[in-house]
Image: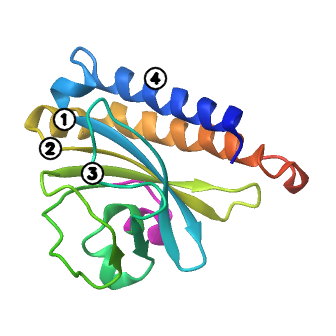
């Protein structure tokens, strides 16, 4: 919520996106990063980083957290299953139940991980997505799993700074 924390978050996800795309660039691999915060029974886009313009909008893109949406949306599956999820994806049809806002029709692969709060409950999710084979190859590696796990832990610490009374992060 604060400008300072927002800059830390954006810097962190940009740095990780650039590192994951090596030896290419995020633009060449068509990699992007999105963060979704849990609000009751929805995941709402709260941050993103992309070298190019995106269709998705912060605060407007939201997914209902239920098993039907989880079948099509990796960030929901990661939150509900409380684990890293990687999957090929297809475009979401306009008017898909449980989806509000626009999602790029070009997406072909998503790697998502849950972000936890200081109590170990799901705070939200973070995902890398791509619309290229090169990006899919990068996101399919075991190294990318380790990076996602560490990024989710790092984001947990950052988001805990917004609510210092909640104590330490696990």
Q: Which residue is drawn at 49% across and 64% down?
A: 44
The answer for how far apart the CA atoms under marks 2 and 1 are is: 7 Å
Q: Is residue 125 left or right of residue 166?
A: left
The answer for how far apart the CA atoms under marks 2 and 3 are is: 9 Å
CB of mark 2 within 8 Å of CB of mark 4?
Answer: no
Q: How crowded is mark 1: few (under 14 residues within 10 Å), some or many (20 or more)?
A: many
Q: Position of residue 121 (x, y in %)?
A: 66, 65
Chain part drawn in magenta? 77-85
The residue at which mark 4 appears reads as 15
Q: Earlier in the sequence, mark 1 or mark 4?
A: 4
The residue at which mark 2 appears reads as 131
Q: Which of marks 3 and 4 is nearer the N terminus?
A: 4
Residue 47 lies in magenta, yes or no? no
The extreme left residue here reads 133
Q: How crowded is mark 3: few (under 14 residues within 10 Å), some or many (20 or more)?
A: many
Q: Nearer the viewer, mark 1 or mark 4?
A: 4
Q: Is residue 12 visible to us here?
A: yes
The answer for how far apart the CA atoms under marks 1 and 4 are is: 16 Å
Q: Nearer the viewer, mark 2 or mark 3?
A: 2
Whether residue 57 is situated above or below residue 79 in the rendered picture: above
Q: Is residue 170 visible to us here?
A: no
The residue at which mark 1 appears reads as 135
CB of mark 2 within 8 Å of CB of mark 1?
Answer: yes
**Helix, strand, or loop for circle 4?**
helix
Q: In this view, does 7 lie to the left or right of 85?
A: right
Q: In which quarter of the image is residue 145?
A: top left
The answer for how far apart the CA atoms under marks 3 and 1 are is: 10 Å
């Amino acid at each position: 919520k604060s400008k300072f924390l927002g800059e830390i978050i954006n810097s962190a996800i940009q740095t990780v996106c650039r590192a994951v795309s090596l030896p290419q660039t995020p633009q060449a691999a068509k990699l992007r990063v999105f963060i979704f915060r849990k609000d009751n029974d929805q995941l709402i886009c709260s941050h993103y980083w992309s070298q190019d313009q995106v269709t998705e909008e912060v605060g407007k893109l939201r997914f209902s957290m239920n098993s039907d949406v989880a079948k099509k949306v990796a960030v929901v599956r990661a939150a509900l299953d409380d684990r890293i999820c990687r999957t090929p994806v297809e475009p979401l049809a306009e008017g898909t139940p449980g989806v509000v806002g626009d999602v790029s029709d070009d997406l072909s692969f998503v790697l998502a991980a849950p972000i936890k709060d200081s109590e170990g409950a799901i705070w939200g999710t973070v995902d890398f997505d791509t619309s290229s084979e090169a990006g899919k190859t990068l996101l399919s590696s075991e190294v990318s799993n380790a990076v996602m796990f560490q990024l989710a832990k790092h984001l947990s610490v950052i988001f805990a700074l917004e609510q210092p009374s909640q104590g330490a992060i696990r």
